[in-house]
Every structure is written in structure tokens, then in C-alpha cells.
Image: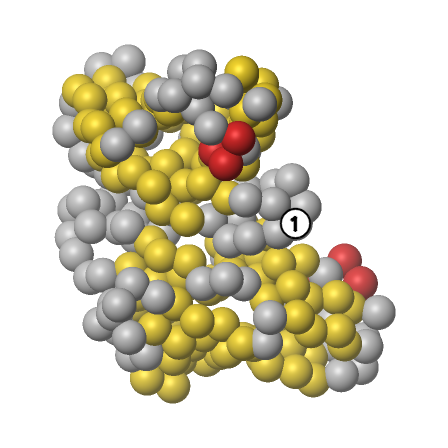
Amino acid sequence: DTEVTQTPKHLVMGMTNKKSLKCEQHMGHRAMYWYKQKAKKPPELMFVYSYEKLSINESVPSRFSPECPNSSLLNLHLHALQPEDSALYLCASSAPGGGGLYNEQFFGPGTRLTVL
Amino acid sequence: QKEVEQNSGPLSVPEGAIASLNCTYSDRVSQSFFWYRQYSGKSPELIMSIYSNGDKEDGRFTAQLNKASQYVSLLIRDSQPSDSATYLCALPPGSARQLTFGSGTQLTVLP
């Protein structure tokens, strides 16, 4: 089952709201990622979790808070977002491996976020 | 120099033609290279992975890797209108786990 699922598909929130994005995979992958993608741009890495530990935070503002409750789940908690945070938020996962040879990442369908 | 340079297009080819997409990269340590296809409004879909110099074929798709010249390309033979999408090349910088993406090439296959 090569599938990463994300909920919700669409989210509209105000700048004072708190919401969460959810991602799930059942491929036994031990690395999970959050990306942000603006229109006509490539995905931009936000966070990397490796074996449920945060290994990379690409200087993302604190209004984005990731969480990895277990090896299958990844959350992104949102609070006090700005309109410029409107984007497609993508979750991805990859198998463990070394030497850079096993980094095939599989993406979920994404959550389209609009901040009003 | 950006880590991954991709001919940004847009690229238009007639149906049945060969579409050629190219990327160059700066990190000589990179060992893995990937091509993703992204339809408008959808998420990236992995279509090819290549790790060794030379060609790798999968159906109508051929990935080519030349580590000495630091380029990777994707050929799409017998292009179909359903191939119209943005194609992203990606590689992990060095031995890192995350991917660096090229800017993407928007391909349109004209019926």
C-alpha cells in the first residue's frame, strides 16, 4: 500500500483560529516530511521527522508546530496564521536508509489552506 | 548557483513527439535522482528514480543520468495530452534525507 493520506483536503481559517493538519502512512516509513507549496513553485521543505524525532526545522515560524505522535502519524498545528501562509501543504514519507540511496519520497494529496 | 537548475519552460510538444526535460545539479556527492510529475492542483507523484550513470527505461519514460557532467534528464516518448503536467526533478543534497527540487518544467502536449 503506497499511500499517504492527508486530512482535511481543504481548510479555510481566520488569523485567530487554531487548526491542525493530519497525515498518515502505513508503509512502514520512518521519515516523514511537511512541505509548503505556493502556486507555480516547487515544494518547500518545512520539517523532517526521522524515527519520530524532529531532525530538521527549516527556520519555520513558530505559528507552525509539528508533532509526530507515532511512526504512522504526522500533525501540523496551526495558530495565528497570516494570509501569506495560504498554500498547499504536503506531507511525504520515505523509507529509512543510508547513503542517500533510499530517499524515494511519496507524497500525500495535500491540504489546500486558505487564511482569511 | 542553485543546487538544482531545471529548464523552466514552458515546453510544448505535439502529440506523439518526444519531450525532453533536463536538470543540472551542483552537488557531486548526490547519489539519488528523482522525477516527479505534478498535475495542476494535485500533489507530486514519483515517476522515476535513477541512481546509476546511464539510462533507465520505464514504459514511455527514460531517465538519463550523467554524474560526470552533473545532469539528469527525462525523455517522454510518444507524448500524450495526459502527460501535460509540471515535471520536477529532485535530489537529496549530499547524504541528506530531504529533497531539493528544481523549479519545475511545465509540459503541454498538444493534440
Residue A29, quarter of picture: bottom left
Q: Say which of B95 and B88 sits in front.
A: B88
User: In the image, residue B8 lies at what x, y percent?
Assistant: 57, 24
Residue B23, quarter of picture: top left
Q: Secondary structure at mark 1?
A: loop
> From what the image shows, is residue A34 above or below residue B48?
below
Relative horizontal placement of residue B106, taking residue A57 as reference (left or right):
right
> From what the image shows, is residue A69 above or below residue A105?
below
CA neighbours of label 1 inside 10 A, class few (<14), some (14 to 19), many (20+): some
User: In the image, residue B3 lies at what x, y percent?
Assistant: 43, 31
The residue that disc 1 covers is: A38
Q: Say which of A26 and B109 sits in front.
A: B109
- The type of residue carrying mark 1 is Lys
User: In the image, residue B97 lies at what x, y percent?
Assistant: 30, 52
In the image, farthest residue toward the front: B111
What's the residue at 75%, 66% (across, down)?
Answer: A114
Q: Say which of B16 and A99 sits in front.
A: B16
